[in-house]
Amino acid sequence: MTTALTIQTEQDMVNILYREVMDLHSEGFDIQVISVVFEYLVENEKEAMMFIAREKILWAQMVYTILTKLLGFRRMP
């Protein structure tokens, strides 16, 4: 479920983003991986807004895309 509220300040955005990204830990993502993703999204506002707007089921795909950009990470088939 996406967050259905108006983001009024940059700090609101960061707080919402933190909660949403950290929720990936319960989906089996390593805390270090999601910390890297969080830092990336804080620095890339447009992608952060896309992350928040997307359905939770699509978040993993976005995580792999971010890791590919940052680390040269290749997802195993």
Image (spheres, rainbow, N blue to C red):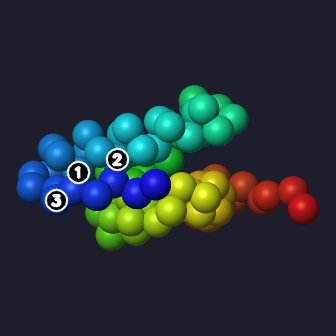
Report if the CB atoms under discs 1 and 2 are less than 8 Å apart: yes
The residue tagged 3 is 6
Visible residue check, residue 13? yes
N-term-proximal mark, 3 vs 2: 3
Q: Residue at x 64, y 62 (%)?
A: 61
Q: Secondary structure at mark 3?
A: loop
Visible residue check, residue 66? no
Q: Residues within 10 Å of mark 3 (few under 14, many from 20)?
A: few
The image quarter containing residue 70 is: bottom right
Q: Which mark lies nearer to you, 3 or 2?
A: 3
- Of the pair 7 and 37, the residue shown nearer to us: 7
The residue tagged 1 is 13
Callout 1 amino acid:
Met
N-term-proximal mark, 1 vs 3: 3
66 vs 29: above or below: below
3D distance between C-alphas at marks 3 and 2: 13 Å
3D distance between C-alphas at marks 1 and 3: 9 Å
Callout 2 amino acid:
Leu
